[in-house]
Amino acid sequence: MYGAQSTDEEPERTAFRLAEKRYKLYKSLPPKTRKKPVLNQTDLFDVVDFHAILESVDPIDGIFRLDCPGFDRPVFCFRDRPESNANTSVEAQGSFKSVSASTLLRKLRWGTLGLQFNWSKRNYDFTLPHNKIPEKLCQLAKEMAIPAMPSGEEFQPEAAIVNYFGPSDMLGGHLDDMEADWSKPIVSISLGCKAIFLLGGTSREDVPVSMFLRSGDIVLMAGKARECFHGVPRIFTDDKHAEVSVLLSQFSGEDDCCITDYIKNSRININIRQVN
């Protein structure tokens, strides 16, 4: 998927790669049976759970609550990865082939809002026509970026990349290094099924912190965290771990069935950037 970066010189078993393999979803088919594939049992003991932190009175080593005047949502920071905040709260020659909308939706992996990104050159192409990011999304991004912005300065949403995750999809470890000014945060919004997010260091050899991201959670990649490798090795689509009931409750009409069916086994990530 988008963002996975590797080089021939890069060792296969870096600390970040080992963490990805640990949490990645693997399936095995019982021999000589027609049963459904068996999912691997993953030890999630070390994954940071912000909901649990909110309910606990005991402090967690390396994590602290950020007091941000004028911002009424809980914000947590990691001491050894400064300013990386998790805010909880298609015409071809020949014949045409008919493909259902649901099939096409499942093939969708990413899209862009605002300024268009040139994937081959890895930069923003200001010459391409584009529409602005929807106003309500811009306003949300501005409000959520407050904890990572200097006093009196407002975040300016100019581009967004939308990643679509299916049950077995992952986002490999990468850096978001396409913007000229790294002093501005990236506002990353999670919707749909719960996921594991890995936040590493400036090298793939640094052991990443793993944390749960639920629907509605927002990560601010800011300051030194803009230089840190990060990725999503796993999303949870089973009834026990997906945790989408609150989001599903927002859709109750008969015409919403296609939306709810998609939500039950998908995750959408909208990461909004200030380019200039």
Image: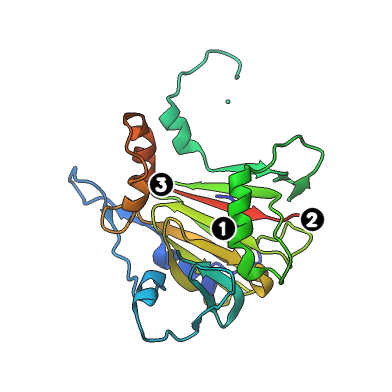
Give the camera-side residue of 195 and 71: 71
Answer with left or right where residue 31 lies relative to residue 255.
left
Amino acid type shown at disc 3: Ser
Ranked by sequence position, the earlier of labels 3 and 1 is 1
Q: Does dot 1 land on a helix, a strand or a loop? A: strand
Q: Estimate the x, y position of residue 113 in percent, counting from the top left.
A: 64, 43
Answer with left or right where residue 145 lies relative to residue 196.
right
Q: Which mark is residue 266?
A: 3
Callout 2: 10 Å neighbours few (<14), some, many (20+)?
Answer: few
Ranked by sequence position, the earlier of labels 3 and 2 is 3
Label 3 vs label 2, nearer the camera? 2
Q: Does dot 3 land on a helix, a strand or a loop? A: loop
Regarding residue 101, the answer to whether it shows in the image is yes
Where does label 1 land, which residue? 188
Where does label 2 land, which residue? 276
3D distance between C-alphas at marks 3 and 1: 16 Å
**Furthest residue toward front:** 70
Amino acid type shown at disc 1: Ser
Amino acid type shown at disc 2: Asn
Give the camera-side residue of 133 and 202: 133
Residue 243 sits in quarter: bottom left
Regarding residue 6, the answer to whether it shows in the image is no
Locate the C terminus and report the quarter of the image it occupies: bottom right
3D distance between C-alphas at marks 3 and 2: 32 Å
Q: Estimate the x, y position of residue 139 in percent, counting from the top left.
A: 62, 52
Callout 3: 10 Å neighbours few (<14), some, many (20+)?
Answer: many
Relative vertical location of residue 39 with respect to residue 49 in this rendering, above or below: above
Going 54% across and 78% down the picture, which residue do you hit? 66
Ranked by sequence position, the earlier of labels 2 and 1 is 1
Q: Does dot 2 land on a helix, a strand or a loop? A: loop
Q: Estimate the x, y position of residue 110 in percent, counting from the top left.
A: 57, 43
